[in-house]
Image (cartoon, grey):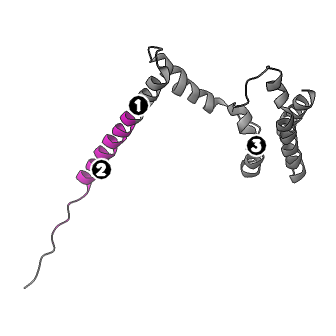
Amino acid sequence: MVRAAHALLDFLFLAQFRSHTSETLSQLEGYLVAFHNNKAIFVDLGIWKNFNIPKFHSMLHYTSSIRLFGTTDNYNTEQSERLHIDLAKNVFRATNRKDKYAQMTTWLECRKKVQWHSASIDWRQNHLQNVRTQTPIRPLSVRT
């Protein structure tokens, strides 16, 4: 348990560096491997059921994200938390709490279809407006 916690804390500390080298990124991956190799103790002791947690999954992408976008300063989880509110909590509130997964799925499908229809209407209105504002094409006069 101590090894898993130690590896996770080392990973989090190192991920916050203001600059990285290939060596620090390699260490970052090593700490993550050490955490994953030792995390089973939490499940075995009944402390945690599983590690299917988005924030743990996102750690798999830290190294590649740092290589692509730079250091992790100013990263946050606001977007995924906002999506969770929109796509889970609000949807659940729209159900009657009976057969909630089927109701939530149906609600999300309906919402997506309404968004597609709305986008189609917007596109059509913009297309018609563009057609109306274009200058008409006059036929070429033919000389005989």
| Helix, strand or loop: magenta stretch | helix
The N terminus sits in image quarter: top right
Which residue does the image show at 73% across and 44% down from the upper left? 61
The verdict on residue 40 being magenta is no
Q: Residues within 10 Å of mark 1 (few under 14, many from 20)?
A: few
Please determine whether, in this image, residue 100 is positioned above or below residue 11.
above
Nearer to me, 121 or 35:
35
In terms of secondary structure, where does tag 2 sit? Answer: helix
Q: Position of residue 71 (x, y in %)?
A: 78, 43
Q: Is residue 62 left or right of residue 101?
A: right
Q: Which mark is residue 62?
A: 3
Q: Is residue 125 magenta?
A: yes
Residue type, label 2: His
Label 2 and label 3: CA atoms lie apart by 42 Å
Read off the magenta span: 113-139
Asked whether disc 1 touches disc 3, contact meaning CB atoms under 8 Å apart, the reply is no
Give the CA separation, mark 1 to mark 3: 32 Å
95 shown above or below 106: above
Residue 144 appears in view: yes
**Dot 1 amino acid type:** Arg
Considering the image in quadrants, where does the C terminus appear? bottom left
- Looking at the image, how many numbered discs can be counted on the residues? 3
What residue is rendered at 31% in x and 41% in y? 121
Q: Which residue is mark 1?
A: 111
Query: In the rendered image, which quarter is residue 106 located in?
Result: top left
- The answer to which image quadrant residue 139 occupies is bottom left
Q: Position of residue 117 (x, y in %)?
A: 34, 38
Which residue does the image show at 35% across and 37% down from the upper left? 118
Q: Earlier in the sequence, mark 2 or mark 3?
A: 3
Instruction: Where is residue 98? Give x, y as percent.
Output: 46, 15
Q: Which residue is mark 2?
A: 127
